[in-house]
Image: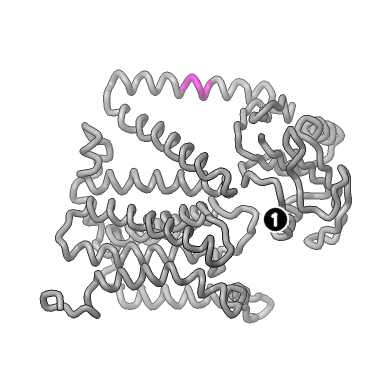
């Protein structure tokens, strides 16, 4: 017994049991084809007229209706807006991760990390609330314990299930935890965290750990940066780089936010940022029609925009985005890539030419059948400098190739 609460009813017991479930789930999914079954469930649909409606979407809508029915009387402006923010946070997570997976937004495996660790955040909150801890300590301890639990889970999977240590999964778990914390303090507690006021910047560094709203926002920033970088550097060889780049970007952003409360530093920051924007705008305007300006070790300059270290995908319409830094493209990756191109894909395979692997042939130029549009696709595999020359030449000829550039 724990006071008047039995062991079974104790929130601390619930939290520990749930942690064990989180760690055990990956191993359970690998047994008896459960993971493939979940994938099939995500694709189940039923016809309504000429439209196929996903079963998971229907279940989600029913769940939302039930929640609204039982909480309608408690629904107010803060809670209503907060529910839209929660949906937005899920959307951010989906758009920032697993680009080559090409998941549907309603797939169970796509959203598992967010839901699982949002629940973890709630159970952790219940257990810590019994200890009468202030909100800022609950937020920080929940964040740390989620990070530790997810990291332990990834370590345990390596020898027992022949899986790799996936720092991207850890980042998604942390993001799910942040979604759970937002639900707690803005929906369940009706925005109680706002009682301290809307002030985010604090006079000293230690004050950020005393203000729950400031701490929550900073941890959201850290979690988002971590999720983005971990999704761009998924290979295990980049784990240290992921951590260092995450903290470097977070440190710069935090420093800017903190220093802008002081007049002198604020003016300096405004001048520097304005100068950078003007300079970058000048080069974009100057080289906008020139496509790839130059390529060098770990840097690509596209339309006057320097892209450093990360791999980049340039769409047929000329827009671009950073993508997972990888050398081998599996069948799932290829299917996603094929849906993005018209009829030509150019791969910059790195300066040593060890990227762009996984396709049927190793020839520099090869043709494959694109099932997504029933057309043939020409695939060109070249070292970076040659690939950039080929891309520029094709664009000059009026063609619209897709370029995937391995930055190394």
Q: Position of residue 238 (x, y in %)?
A: 56, 43
The foreground one among 315 and 219 is 219
Q: Which residue is disc 1 drawn over?
A: 333
Q: Is residue 103 above or below residue 210?
A: below
For the C terminus, the image quarter is top right
Which residue is painted at 22% across and 52% down in the image? 137
Whether residue 330 sits left or right of residue 159 in the image: it is: right
Which residue is at a point 31% across and 77% down the rendered structure image?
70
**Residue 398 occupies which quadrant of the picture?**
top right
- Is 275 magenta? The answer is yes
Q: Residue sitting at 50 percent across and 52 percent down?
A: 167
- Could you tell me what secondary structure mostly forms the magenta stretch? helix
Horizontal relation, residue 21 to residue 3: left or right: right
Helix, strand or loop at mark 1: helix
Hey, which quadrant is residue 37 in on the image?
A: bottom right
* The quadrant where residue 10 appears: bottom left
Left or right: where does residue 86 sit relative to residue 396?
left
Q: Of 128 and 342, which appears nearest the observer?
A: 128
Residue range corresponding to the magenta coloring:
274-278
Residue 337 position in % (x across, y down): 72, 52
| Number of marks in picture | 1
Q: Quadrant location of the N terminus? A: bottom left
Q: Is residue 394 magenta?
A: no
């Amino acid at each position: 017994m724990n006071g008047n609460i039995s062991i079974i009813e104790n929130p601390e017991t619930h939290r520990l049991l749930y942690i064990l479930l989180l760690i055990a789930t990956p191993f359970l999914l690998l047994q008896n084809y459960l993971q493939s079954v979940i994938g099939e469930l995500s694709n189940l649909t039923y016809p309504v007229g000429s439209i196929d409606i996903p079963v998971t979407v229907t279940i989600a809508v029913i769940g939302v209706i039930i929640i609204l029915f039982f909480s309608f009387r408690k629904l107010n402006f803060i809670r209503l807006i907060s529910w839209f923010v929660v949906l937005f946070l899920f959307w951010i997570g989906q758009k920032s991760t697993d680009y080559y997976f090409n998941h549907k937004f309603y797939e169970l495996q796509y959203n598992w990390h967010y839901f699982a660790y949002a629940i973890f955040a709630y159970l952790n909150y219940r257990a810590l609330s019994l200890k009468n801890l202030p909100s800022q300590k609950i937020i920080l301890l929940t964040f740390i314990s989620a990070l530790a639990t997810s990291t332990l889970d990834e370590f345990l999977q390596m020898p027992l299930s022949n899986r790799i240590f996936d720092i991207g999964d850890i980042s998604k778990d942390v993001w799910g935890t942040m979604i759970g914390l937002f639900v707690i303090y803005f929906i369940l507690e009706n925005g109680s965290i706002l009682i301290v006021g809307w002030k985010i910047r604090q006079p000293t560094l230690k004050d950020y750990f005393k203000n729950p709203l400031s701490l929550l926002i900073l941890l959201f920033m850290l979690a988002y940066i971590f999720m983005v970088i971990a999704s761009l550097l998924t290979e295990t060889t980049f784990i240290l780089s992921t951590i260092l780049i995450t903290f470097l970007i977070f440190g710069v952003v935090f420093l800017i936010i903190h220093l802008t409360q002081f007049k002198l530093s604020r003016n300096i920051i405004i001048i520097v940022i304005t100068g950078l924007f003007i300079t970058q705008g000048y080069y974009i305007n100057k080289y906008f029609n020139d496509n790839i300006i130059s390529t060098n070790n770990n840097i690509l300059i596209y339309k006057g925009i320097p892209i450093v270290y990360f791999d980049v995908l340039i769409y047929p319409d000329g827009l671009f985005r950073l993508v997972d830094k990888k050398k081998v493209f599996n069948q799932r990756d290829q299917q996603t890539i094929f849906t993005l191109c018209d009829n030509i894909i150019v791969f910059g395979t790195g300066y040593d030419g060890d990227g762009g692997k996984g396709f049927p042939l190793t020839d520099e130029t090869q043709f494959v059948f694109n099932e997504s549009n029933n057309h043939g696709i020409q695939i060109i595999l070249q070292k970076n400098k040659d690939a950039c020359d080929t891309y520029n030449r094709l664009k000059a000829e009026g063609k619209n190739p897709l370029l995937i550039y391995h930055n190394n």
